[in-house]
Amino acid sequence: MSADLPSTRSLEKRPDTGPENQLAALERVWRRFGDGASLLKRGGRVTEVSATHYKVRGLSEIARLGDVVEQRGQAGTRRGEIVKISRDEVVVAPFERSADAGIGDAVFRRGPLTVSPHPTWRGRAIDALTRPIDGGPPLIRGDDGDGQAATPGALSRQRVGTSFMTGVRVIDIFTPLCFGQRLGIFAGSGVGKSTLLAMLAGADAFDTVVVALIGERGREVREFLEDTIGDSMAKTIAVVATSDESAMMRRRAPDTAMRVAEHFRDQGHRVLLVLDSITRFAHALREVATGTGEPPVARGYPASVFTELPKLLERAGPGAEGKGSITAIISVLVDGDDHNDPVADSVRGILDGHVVLDRSIAEQGRYPPVNPLSSISRLAGKAWSPEQRALVTMLKSMISRFEDTRDIRLLGAYQGGVDAELDNAVRQVPLIYEALTQSPRDRPSADPFSDLARHLRGKQNADAAD
């Protein structure tokens, strides 16, 4: 009892605390419950479960949108993300393939998801939560906080002006790229966009490549990384969320890939970000948003989808002065080959150019099936010389004339010698198409204009000899 007397006396001598001091003491205790290092955790209970979401009561006052929560139930510990907060409850979208939660399960807030890249991540494949999926050793975490860099301000970014060669002739001639550019590959399903993306990912101009595979078929991931990416995998970080994973994993994967790219950009690297595809990211956004009760506004897409797209894509581009850049090549899967569907139309307005893959060209056996007349690079003027610009303008004019008269020639109504420009197009355009044909196994082109000239001269000399 004597050991307790000093503490009792100290309590007796303590001045009477007023309401303000009592509130301050209560606040200190309250904050201890929210401290991640505290043994005491404030949580909530699951009150409702659906196939893609579940609701939790008791977290509304401390929850923030985007916070990760931990749900403990009969199936073990599962994680999810808070996607909606109301006065009495929060809505959680699970990272697992199904909610797998039960009424009354305990749920605890874990704060925002952290991504801390490290140089040793190059050559690895990870999921949307930065867990390794390639069977390799555990990842080393960087020491730069949560790994999320601030998007450079509009006037603090470097100016885009340095071009590079992709090695793909049709791209380098008609839609040349610059470091820090954001280009979209627009195509229907099965036209060959993934093959073209892999050819572009092998460009030697970059220090680091980040590949985000969103909603891809599971059997194709390993083939894409080992066969198509191949030797370039040593400098590549792959972020994978296959089509059978939850909507939250497919929604989170592009953000994880962008954070990794931003980390290496701030280290001064020239980063290539390949995202396949932004449409499946939009589908995941739609699934999550409709699960929270958000109404659709355009072909089933809620308004938040068109808010999230520019938020993600504007993070790419040139970095601040003294930093590197993120060159983004984004594939857009156009539903039903409709290039004016809401997602394609919105993305086209955000990006710095678009390459259109045409199914009719693919059916003719010409790969990559790029339509040079429909494809545009908004920064081509910074990559072409005046002579190259004039040549490309002439090539497009010939191709346009050739395609516009295709039906007439098929009907047998074309007569040579009547129109000199059309005669020239009929002779040259098939040779141009032949020169632009390229497969992933072919050697990358170091000088596409010279390759095109050599091919045309070779054919002309062969015809003259005949």
Image (spheres, rainbow, N blue to C red):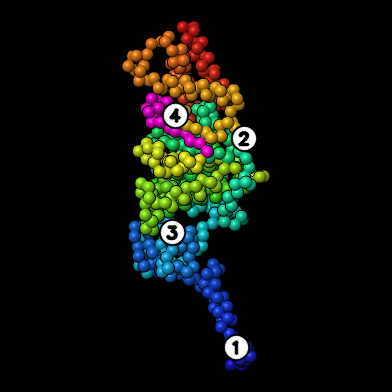
Of the two numbered discs 3 and 1 on the same chain, state the one appearing first in sequence. 1
Looking at numbered disc 2 in the image, what kind of residue is underneath it? Answer: Thr
Residue at disc 3, secondary structure: strand
**Quarter where residue 60 is shown:** bottom left
Q: Is residue 333 above or below residue 23?
A: above
Residue at disc 4, secondary structure: loop
Of the two numbered discs 1 and 2 on the same chain, state the one appearing first in sequence. 1
Where does label 4 land, which residue? 371
Where does label 2 land, which residue? 162
- The crowd level at tag 1 (other Cα within 10 Å; few <14, some 14-19, many 20+) is few
Q: Is residue 304 above or below residue 74?
A: above
The disc placed on residue 16 is 1
Q: Is residue 388 above or below residue 335?
A: above
**Quarter where residue 105 is shown:** bottom left
- The answer for how far apart the CA atoms under marks 3 and 1 are is 45 Å
Looking at numbered disc 1 in the image, what kind of residue is underneath it? Answer: Asp
- The answer for how far apart the CA atoms under marks 2 and 3 are is 40 Å
| Residue 149 percent coordinates (x, y) | 59, 52
Looking at numbered disc 4 in the image, what kind of residue is underneath it? Answer: Asn
